[in-house]
Amino acid sequence: MSAKEWFSQKLQTLENDVEFLTYKANLNFTENMLKILNEKGVKHVNKYLAEKLNCSPAYVSKLLNGNPNLTIKKMTKIALILDHELQINLVSMPSTNAKKSAAKDKTLVNAKKNRRSAKAKSLQRREKIQL
């Protein structure tokens, strides 16, 4: 099994893992938050957020490092500090059948490309023979 196949298999096992999806959502939130703070020109993020949230810089550091206890309430407070609104949306996940269908379509496209390539090579050989 190649490394790519192994990684793909591992990633598929995590698609419905609550811990993984929670961490992913948390990471997306903190990345967006840091992007906004960067755009605002905030240099000392931990100190800035600690002052605004009335907590210690160490606690902010925990939040920024993927603390799973980042509550919706705390996320809302951070959003307000950044002059933003927290929105939580549900996004449909691709179904297993859709993934299989997409993989099958990709396989068919690759097969057609290979046939076209083989046909082109065959025509080139014929042209060389006729010359």
Image: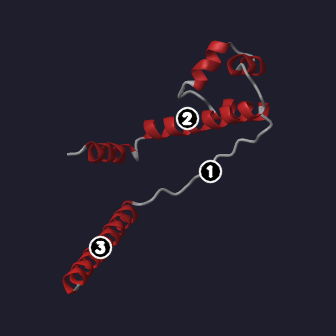
Residue denoted by label 3: 117
Q: At 29% from the left edge and 78% from the top edge, which residue is drawn?
A: 120
Numbered disc 2: secondary structure: helix
Which numbered disc, 1 or 3, marks the residue closer to the eye? Answer: 3
Q: Give the amino acid type for the residue marked by disc 2 in the picture.
A: Leu
- In the image, which disc is placed on residue 27? 2
Which image quarter is the C terminus in? Answer: bottom left
Numbered disc 1: secondary structure: loop
How much space separates mark 3 and mark 2, taking CA atoms?
44 Å
**Along the polypeptide, which appears first: circle 3 or circle 2?**
2
**Along the polypeptide, which appears first: circle 1 or circle 3?**
1
Q: Give the amino acid type for the residue marked by disc 3 in the picture.
A: Ser
Point out the residue furthest to the bottom here: 130
**Residue 124 horizontal/vertical position (percent):** 26, 78
**Residue 40 horizontal/vertical position (percent):** 78, 32
Q: At 55% from the left edge and 24% from the top edge, which residue is drawn?
A: 65
| Residues tagged 2 and 1 counted as in contact (Cβ below 8 A) | no
How much space separates mark 2 and mark 1, taking CA atoms?
16 Å
Numbered disc 3: secondary structure: helix
Q: Is residue 113 above or below residue 47?
A: below
